[in-house]
Image (cartoon, coloured by chain):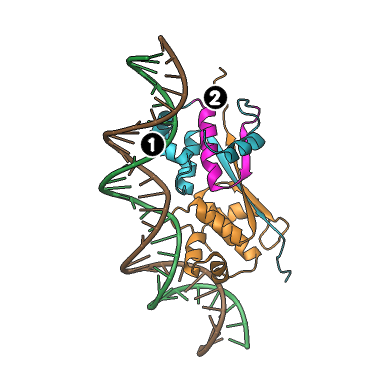
Chain colours: A orange, B cyan, C green, D brown
Amino acid sequence: MKTYTLDQAKDELIGLAGSFERDQYETELQLELIGDMIQKARKQRKLTQEELGDLVGVKKSQISRLENNTGNITLDTVLKVFKALEAKVNINIEMLNKKVEVV
Amino acid sequence: MKTYTLDQAKDELIGLAGSFERDQYETELQLELIGDMIQKARKQRKLTQEELGDLVGVKKSQISRLENNTGNITLDTVLKVFKALEAKVNINIEMLNKKVEVV
DNA sequence: CAAATTGTTTACATTTAATGAAACTTTTTG
DNA sequence: CAAAAAGTTTCATTAAATGTAAACAATTTG
């Protein structure tokens, strides 16, 4: 596998490895985690990288790169991949410390 | 302003325009909406595009492009901008129709 | 209304994401 | 273990994101 940080996150966010108690993964958006979420979703679908690649319309090598957080993925790519995985992507923006001027 | 679709979304997702009842915006991730979320957050902070640009480290023209959904933003940029806006970005992946093979 | 501020668009350069092909590595299977 | 399958990495190319500056346009203000 890869780094420990990812595994920690996975355990915490997705439940124990191997179990499918949840079908919804939520976390703070981080570049390093998006690839992992792709991989997790792909494995849940029991697809190989090549199969997912076929669904998305790219080669398996590209899927590998996306999963391994090479570079800096674009939103378009995120959406394409999760659409192929029949997953819905939600985003949530939380404003911190309400410094809003009350005019 | 821009298109009606965005306004509809805003009304539905963020509450009536002008009111700040919510400080959290959540929606299905769409390329066309991310720019709007940036703009909404920026305005909530009472910042001009130039000021936000300074915080992020880019020119105001770039902020404009991001808000107007020119192109296809990268996750890195998404994170940079919302960090400057002191906002937390959460992402949520929801697996649809559980086609998971039960091995 | 005129000036100032704010936001948009364009032109051009630079960087980088996306991608395929093929070699290479790792894992799985029989 | 050997073959097959799955995954990773390298090399090269293309397209697009990003950056800056400057010209424009729109909005706000006095």
Please, which chain is the residue tagged with disc 2 on?
Answer: A
Q: Amino acid at mark 1?
A: Ser
Q: Quadrant of the rendered structure where residue B8 is?
A: top right
The residue segment tinted magenta is B21-46
| Residue A58 screen position, x and y as percent | 49, 67
Q: How many marks?
A: 2
Q: Could you tell me which residue is drawn at 71 percent across and 69 percent down?
A: B101
Residue A102 visible: yes
**Which residue position is annotated with label 1?**
B61
| Residue B34 screen position, x and y as percent | 53, 42
Distance, label 1 to label 2, CA atoms, is 25 Å
Residue B86 visible: no
Q: Could you tell me which residue is drawn at 71 percent across and 65 percent down?
A: B99
Q: Is residue C1 left or right of residue B8?
A: left
Label 1 in the same subunit as label 2: no
Residue B94 vertical placement versus B57 (above, below): below
| Residue B66 screen position, x and y as percent | 46, 41
**Which residue position is annotated with label 2?**
A99
Residue A44 among those drawn in magenta: no
Q: Amino acid at mark 2?
A: Lys
